[in-house]
Amino acid sequence: MVQPLDKPLPSATTDRQRLSGRIRQFIYHHRDTLNGYGFLLPFLIIYLTFLIFPLLRGVWISLHDWDLLIGNLGWTGLDNYTRMFTRDNTFWLSTRNTVQFVALSTIPLVSLGLLIAVALNRPLPLMGLFRTIFFSSYVLSISVVTLIWFMLLNPNRGILAAAFQLVGLEPIAWLNNVDLAMPAIVVTSVWWTMGFNVVLFLAGLQDIPRAIYEAAEIDGASAFRRFFSITLPMLKRTVVLVFILQIIASFQIFGQVFLMTRGGPAGSTRVLVQHIYERGFRGFELGYGSAMSMFLFSIMLAISLIQLYVGSRGDQIESGMK
Amino acid sequence: MTTQQAGSSTINWKKWIWLFTFYAVLGVFAFIWLVPIVWAISMSFTPNTVLARQIGGLLPTAFTFENYETLMRVSSVPRWFLNSMIVSVGTTLGVLVISSMAGYSLSRINFRGKTFITVFILAGLMVPEQAVFIPLHIMFSEWGMHNTHVALMLPRMAIPLGTFIMMQFFRAIPMDIEEAASIDGANRLTVYLRIMLPLTIPALTTLGIFTFVLSWNDFLWPLVSATRSDMFTITIGLASLQGNFAQSEGLGSLMTSAVVASAPMLLLFLFFQRYIVQAVKTGTRF
């Protein structure tokens, strides 16, 4: 019984050995590729499933009549897009208001952020504390921010109204005024996110050698002159970066308006993301909503590409200088 | 000698005036910045009945813990808080595992197609949440997965920022540390777990805190995915309270919810500020 089994066994093991040896050799030979993709795989699966695939599917959905509850109601080609550009006045109103918000918010968010960062960049005591204060509002969630500011701006119960009364002024119903609602939203947004820009500017400022300032001070350059002749030119790349990041972020405005004014009064603060949300999830028109989000995405993509272009040119200039 | 002394004292005098003005202006600014937060905290300690009669001050006119007690006993806030904790901790752990692995691969291993994949992943930084939230909603509807914690976690994990941040940190570690280990015959997984991960603990802390804050404050996706009130995150729950101010239990209670919702973020921020600032810097350095 033992003998017949013994005979074929050696050759089988050598076959198996040869095969496993070949596999081992293959693995050894391609170990970097296998390791590389092995480590990437978990992220890549999540990334493809929850970002890239939805993006492509969003384009597909935008070409359909797609109901929130029923689902796909059939191909409509570019109809959603023509509707958006030619027949939907609210879409244009929302786009205009969004652009208005971007313009109104970007300027103070960048300039005030820069101003405060320059102030905090001095080697003086308490600067860390001030940075903490200006950045602290950034970690609050949108619904906390709107809850506080909605009350703060309230003409009957807000602390701003109390301050107005104290100096003998009539309290103003900011959020109910067609002309003042958007500026009030801008102020809220500046308070919420300016700290982020301060931190970015501080990082850029720390790269400027202190010796340059000291030399300028010895030469008698005023603080004003130092800012325009040293700080701004040396900080150019950071300023452009913050500016573009801010424009992209401002285009995404939604929560402030959605929770504080619902787009009112008289549509004066209605913005794009809110229109997308309301058409999609209140009007059940996901196909149409998707088409509008593709429009928003293409604007933001264009701005990102400008950033990449400017960034690479900045690199060229810098390496050229070296 | 005398002229010199006179000269330096005027300079000193001027310098002091300048310093005083500098701190005064900055102090006023910082005070204004703090008013909304201080006001909200003050109102959370003021009885609702008092706030119905008068405008809340920067210090509570009558002090009470009642708002906090009621909040813990009868409101949905503890439930929402728990949901936010589950979702944020889950998202953070997920991001740390998959992003540090991917970051390790892209910065430390040479393989065919690496450049393409790096560009392909970094391109994802340009895809905003608003471009994908409708298709994501449809996908999770098809899977019947809305109103679950997992549905709130997965889309946040797909964001390439974590991989990008980890890549930059791994690149900064000297190559020879790893080479010494591989000569000793250790395989990649061992090298990654035993040598590289311990070295990137500061980076993991940075990324972890940043992801936690982003996840806790996430708004658009949980707004459309979690529609049942018992599945709200605290951010969405708080937003739902704002829709009906008239029915709400009172201003003091409302502000108490806001304070409770922000407490973890403010504490994290105060203790780990350095790391959050680091994340902001690394995440935007292209």
Image (tube, rainbow, N blue to C red):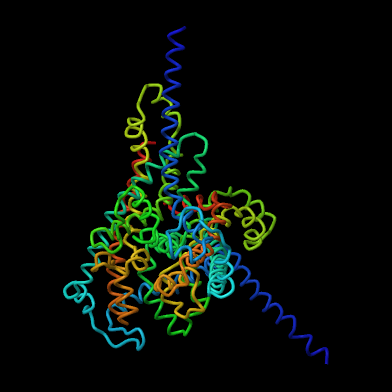
The single residue placed furthest to the front in the displayed view is B53
Front-most of residues B262 and A2? B262
Left or right: residue A1 compared with residue B22: right
Left or right: residue A92 compared with residue B174: left
The relative height of residue A7 versus residue B165 in the rendered view (above or below) is: below
Q: In which quarter of the image is the C terminus of chain A?
A: top left
Front-most of residues A160 and B20? A160
**Quick check: can you spot residue A225?**
yes
Q: In which quarter of the image is the N terminus of chain A?
A: bottom right
The single residue placed furthest to the left in the displayed view is A86
Looking at the image, which residue is at 40% across and 25% down? A217
The relative height of residue B67 versus residue A209 in the rendered view (above or below) is: below
Residue B134 position, x and y percent, is 37, 76
Front-most of residues A154 and A207? A154
How many tags in the picture? 0
Looking at the image, which residue is at 40% across and 49% down? A197
The single residue placed furthest to the bottom in the displayed view is A1
Residue B165 position, x and y percent, is 50, 56
Left or right: residue A110 compared with residue B151: left
Front-most of residues B35 and A13? B35
The single residue placed furthest to the right in the displayed view is A2
The relative height of residue A301 versus residue B146 in the rendered view (above or below) is: above
Residue A176 position, x and y percent, is 28, 64
Residue B6 position, x and y percent, is 44, 12
The relative height of residue A53 versus residue B9 in the rendered view (above or below) is: below
The quarter of the displayed image where residue A59 is located: bottom left
Looking at the image, which residue is at 45% across and 58% down? B56
**Quick check: can you spot residue A34?**
no
